[in-house]
Amino acid sequence: MNDEQDKTRRYWLDDRRNIDRLVYLLYGACAFLLIADFLYVKKVHFAFENWIGFYGWYGFCAYVFIVLSAKLWRRVVKRDEDYYERDTD
């Protein structure tokens, strides 16, 4: 392909309707899993594991914790832009 074809080529995620479909598919999957939580008997170690949607909320909170802690950790390990290009004279 040449450059002109690359600029005019559209991918399936460029269409807003396809993105909306993916979002609705995600909502449907979440609803299905929440409903499925009622349909089986859990063998739990702790009482709070029986709460409806516990594992979904647990996973969501763990994800948020990881993202926020990564932002804080970046401040600790961040280096200047020219860190490896500095003169050692």
Image: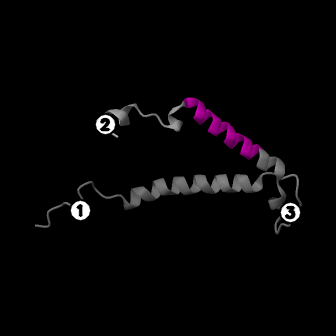
Q: Residues within 10 Å of mark 1 (few under 14, many from 20)?
A: few
Considering only order in the chain, which callout, 2 or 1, is on the residue closer to the N terminus? 2
Q: Give the extent of the magenta segment.
A: 16-31
Q: Foreground mark, 2 or 3?
A: 2
> Compared to 19, does 76 lie above or below?
below
Residue at 55%, 30% in the rendered image = 16
Residue 3 is marked as 2
Q: How is the image coloured?
A: one colour
Q: Would you place residue 20 above or below residue 58 in this image?
A: above
Task: Name the residue at the left extreme.
Answer: 89
- Mark 2 and mark 3: Cα distance apart in space: 57 Å
Image location of residue 49, percent across then percent down: 80, 61
Q: Which amino acid type is marked by label 1?
A: Tyr
Q: Are marks 2 and 3 in contact (CB under 8 Å)?
A: no
Neighbour class for label 3 at 10 Å: few (<14), some, many (≥20)? few
Q: Is residue 23 magenta?
A: yes
Q: Nearer the viewer, mark 1 or mark 3?
A: 3
SS of the residue under disc 3: loop
4 horizontally vs 42: left or right: left
Q: Quadrant of residue 87?
A: bottom left
- Residue at x 59% of width, y 34% of height: 18
Left or right of 47 in this view: 62: left
Task: Identify residue for label 3.
Answer: 42
Q: Which residue is mark 1?
A: 84
Q: Is residue 74 left or right of residue 60?
A: left
Report, in whole angstroms, how far the alpha carbon at label 1 lies from the one at label 3. Answer: 54 Å
Q: Residue 78: x percent and y percent?
A: 35, 58
Q: Residue at x 46, y 55 (%)?
A: 72
Query: Does 5 appear above or below 47?
Result: above
